[in-house]
Image (spheres, rainbow, N blue to C red):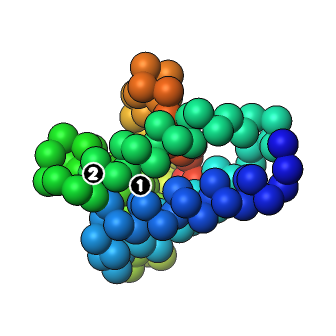
């Protein structure tokens, strides 16, 4: 597979995702960072054109109607945004210290969520990002 195909897949996924979230400001930045991270961390051998096509079709349905697909995308981005914030107020983060138990909880809190996305990808043949992006500290 050519590098150009991967670039086109990234652009198509990003464009259709923006249409699905209606270009809303906090969601577009979270989406951009997740898609970038997914394309940077995955090897080129993991590229599957059929999975990308299925994901684009899912995002087209999410953009077209305010149905189940749109709600899934909206909730994914809400959780990802909250995960990037750290699950609490940024001002409070600077003043509090996290204990060892707190660090472990923040590290494993999204494991079941990521597993659910992975299972959704497997059952529908899609390629939604399913990884944790931030350190708990």
In this view, 90 is above or below 134: below
Name the one closer to the observer, 126 or 12: 12
Coordinates of residue 76 in the picture (x, y in percent): 34, 49
Coordinates of residue 98 in the picture (x, y in percent): 50, 55
In this view, 130 is above or below 123: below
Q: Residue at x 37, y 50 (%)?
A: 59
Give the farthest residue toward the right.
2
Under tag 2, what secondary structure?
Answer: helix
Name the one closer to the observer, 133 or 15: 15
Mark 1 vs mark 2, CA separation in Å: 18 Å
Q: Residue at x 55, y 60 (%)?
A: 12
Q: Residue at x 56, y 42 (%)?
A: 52
Under tag 1, what secondary structure?
Answer: helix
Residue 119 as seen in the image, left or right of residue 9:
left
Q: Quadrant of the C terminus?
A: bottom right
Image mark count: 2
Label 1 close to label 2 by CB (< 8 Å): no
Residue 100 as seen in the image, left or right of residue 4:
left
1 or 2: mark nearer the eye: 2
Say the numbered circle drawn on residue 80: 1
Q: Residue at x 72, y 61 (%)?
A: 7
Q: Upstream in the sequence, badge 1 or badge 2? A: 2
- Label 2 environment density (alpha carbons within 10 Å; few <14, some 14–19, many ≥20): many
- Label 1 environment density (alpha carbons within 10 Å; few <14, some 14–19, many ≥20): many
Q: Determine which residue is flagged by label 2.
A: 62
Q: Which of the 4 image quadrants contains residue 135?
A: bottom right
Residue 98 as seen in the image, left or right of residue 68:
right
Q: Quadrant of the N terminus?
A: top right
Q: Which of the 4 image quadrants contains residue 110?
A: top left
In this view, 104 is above or below 19: above
Coordinates of residue 84 in the picture (x, y in percent): 47, 62
């Amino acid at each position: 597979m050519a590098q150009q195909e991967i670039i086109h897949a990234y652009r198509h996924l990003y464009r259709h995702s923006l249409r699905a979230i209606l270009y809303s400001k906090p969601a577009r930045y979270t989406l951009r960072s997740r898609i970038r991270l997914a394309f940077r961390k995955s090897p080129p051998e993991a590229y599957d054109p059929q999975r990308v096509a299925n994901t684009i079709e899912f995002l087209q349905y999410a953009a077209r109607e305010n149905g189940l697909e749109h709600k899934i995308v909206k909730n994914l981005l809400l959780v990802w945004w909250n995960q990037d914030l750290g699950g609490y107020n940024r001002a409070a983060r600077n003043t509090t210290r996290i204990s060892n138990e707190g660090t472990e909880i923040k590290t494993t809190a999204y494991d079941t969520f990521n597993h659910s996305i992975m299972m959704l990808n497997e059952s529908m043949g899609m390629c939604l990002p399913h990884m944790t992006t931030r350190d708990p500290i």
